[in-house]
Image: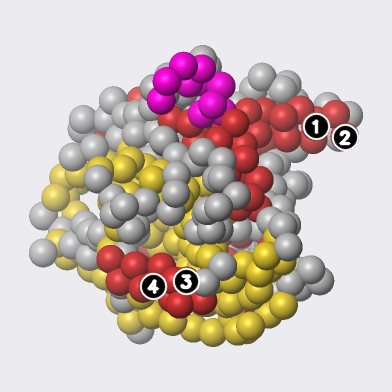
Amino acid sequence: MKQMRSECYRHTVLILAFSALLLVQAPTGNAVQKPERPVTNPCGSVMGVECGHISGNVYHNDYFGLSYAFPDTWKTIPQDVVLSVHQKKVEKERNDALRESHGKPVYLFESWDLLLALKFGPTPLPESKSFNSNIVLWADELSPQVHTLADQFEVSGFTRDPATKILKSPAPVTIAGRQFLRADRLDREDQRDVYHTRIVTFMRSYAIGIDFYSDDLQELEKMVSTLESLRFETQPDTGSVSGRLYRNQFFKFSYQLPDGLTPLDDYMMRQVDLRQRQEHMAELPALPQVTVIFFTSYDLLSAQGAPTSADKKVGPWLRIWAEKGFLTTTPENYFVNNSTFLMDDNIKGRKLPEKLTVGGRTFARAERWGKVQGTKVYEARVATVFNDLTLVFEFGAGSQKELDDLLGSLNSVKFD
């Protein structure tokens, strides 16, 4: 596995790379041409982390549901250029990693630059100009070594770079109702002291960070104060557990967890998701031209229990998630168009989708059973459609009776 972010004067490298690409694309006058290589629409049918756009001086990211207003006189690198640079970087790193692994599948942790705003724009500055203060908004997929926000600063090297001086150790701050961690350091670049502030939070399987760079401490604090404009929309995975009651603000439903199941915390849910992604990668041919696309999904809740008896190897579990409903217009055709739930090679038996009512809404339910590593497993999925999203409940157990008991917990679901 590879961690892709490099800390050493990263913003300078970014500015040079983006500026060079802009100059190549604008050989005459000041017009900026489109990149020669086509760039995928970041807000297309498979919405990803890169799904961002700029309107005026406001950056909005649909995947994370965040918006941020940077200083209104500043210039930004166009989003298509940001994506073009990212694609070339990932292609090189994929090829390098495959060469080092002798063609075996390699999982590359994603590292996205979402926004780069500069005080004087991306063109090289004349010597008479002061330092080109800049703001970088980024999202890094979290590695297994990152459990807390403090771990993110340590793993990234921000707090242990010998070429810098730590001015403020990581400390919690609350912005837009979310918990962040802030740290400050002093970098030395081109015979100049540069003040550098990093502010980070977690969302899903990513660290979202904002870096501020200036050679003037007073200006830096004004730049940091722009985070007062940061806003987060209610997302499909906006939910919480209180006691044994789960509430989701986006879908507006509540659900009572079955007895014996313990909800996983955010870190544990990330590890499960990462393990599944890595297992999926191992099943694919290790070809440089292969790009794995994961449909946009949101993990709402996962819970696990211990085996109910000594002769059972499988403990009960549940998982609730939402995913983009491509071609899914009814609960029943979720199992036909978007899910391989009923097509697994290990299946020995199945119950085809049938309608049922949960909390006053129409769902479809399907079941399957078979052996996994010599152990019999019974599973069920119950799905419904909300506009372009499919909401899915999944239950699993070591016996049909346990599965039926888990399915009975759906009687506690209530929609507002």
Q: Is residue 397 visible?
A: no
In front: label 4 or label 2: 4
Q: Amino acid at mark 1?
A: Asp
The dot on residue 222 is 4
Q: Is residue 281 visible?
A: yes
> Callout 3: 10 Å neighbours few (<14), some, many (20+)?
some
120 or 36, which lies in front? Answer: 120
Q: Amino acid at mark 3?
A: Leu
User: Label 1, on which residue?
Assistant: 96
Quadrant containing the C terminus in the rendered view: bottom left
- Residue sitting at 25 percent across and 59 percent down? 233
Q: Amino acid at mark 4?
A: Lys
The dot on residue 220 is 3
- Residue 282 is situated, as x and y percent measured from the top left of the image, at 72, 35
Question: Rounded to the nearest whole Å, what is the CA distance between mark 4 and mark 3?
Answer: 5 Å
The answer to if 23 sits in the magenta stretch is: yes
- Residue sitting at 38 percent across and 40 percent down? 51
Quarter of the view holding residue 195:
bottom right
Q: Are marks 4 and 3 in contact (CB under 8 Å)?
A: yes
Choose the circle earlier in sequence order: 4 or 2: 2
